Image: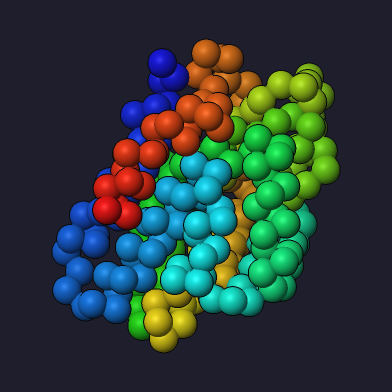
Amino acid sequence: MSRYEHDFTHMFAGLEKQIADTDNPRHRAILKNYRMHGLLEVAGRYEELLAPDMTVEQPHYRLHEGGQSLILDGMDQVTAFYASLVAANALVMWVNRQEIAVHDHGFSGEVEFRQFVPGAMLGESVFGSVQAGEDPDDVYLLTRTLAFVWPYDERGRLIGEHVYEDGASRRIEKPDPADVITAARAAELLAPEIAREIA
């Protein structure tokens, strides 16, 4: 078993307490949407998080990471982005720690994010660049601090993601292969929690 599995499966422990302590129905709905979005995304089930009951018909993402900016405007571009991450096996990620402030328009916060990223992606995307000694065929553990601003519509559906990276926080490590959580294992670990939420 990967030594990261406990942190991975408990990534929303703090958020779950925040949801339980939140009395405002709209704020609770926003936080619950965010939690479900995260579970579905990491499980590779992006079609479900983009469903009309969770996300607006024309979402808008602004991602600023690795010294690059990526703007995704509309459902077609957002769907293609998620599909590309699934194809590249780059959706196994988790929140190491986070502080979230929720309000009527959505939420904002700062999170330490950890993600298994194929070395090949480090040379061609917002995830960064391959450094000396890094093998594009290997999987790396990318850790960085991100600021999130996620707006929501009047129905509590996600309008988009605005993500900003603290470049100075970025670390790339080579994990023990036994500690890498595969996409299939991530989906297996999160399936029971997703099933409980849907039931």
Residue 9 placement (x, y as % from top left): 35, 36
Q: How is the image coloured?
A: rainbow
Residue 199 placement (x, y as % from top left): 27, 53
Tag count in the figure?
0
Q: Residue at x 63, y 21 (%)?
A: 174
Is residue 143 depicted above or below 47 in this figure?
Answer: above
Question: In the image shown, does 158 or 21 lie closer to the viewer?
Answer: 158
Quarter of the view holding residue 22:
bottom left
Is residue 88 depicted above or below 196 in this figure?
Answer: above
Is residue 175 depicted above or below 165 in this figure?
Answer: above
Q: Residue at x 70, y 31 (%)?
A: 118
Question: In the image shown, does 166 or 20 lie closer to the viewer?
Answer: 20
Seen as rendered, the residue at the extreme bottom is 154
Is residue 25 depicted above or below 64 in this figure?
Answer: below
Q: Image check: 41 left or right of 198? A: right
Q: Residue at x 41, y 16 (%)?
A: 1
The answer to whether one can see residue 86 in this image is yes
Q: Image check: 43 left or right of 163? A: left
Residue 157 placement (x, y as % from top left): 45, 74
Q: Residue at x 39, y 77 (%)?
A: 156
Residue 16 placement (x, y as % from top left): 25, 53
The answer to whether one can see residue 143 in this image is no
Quarter of the view holding residue 92:
top right
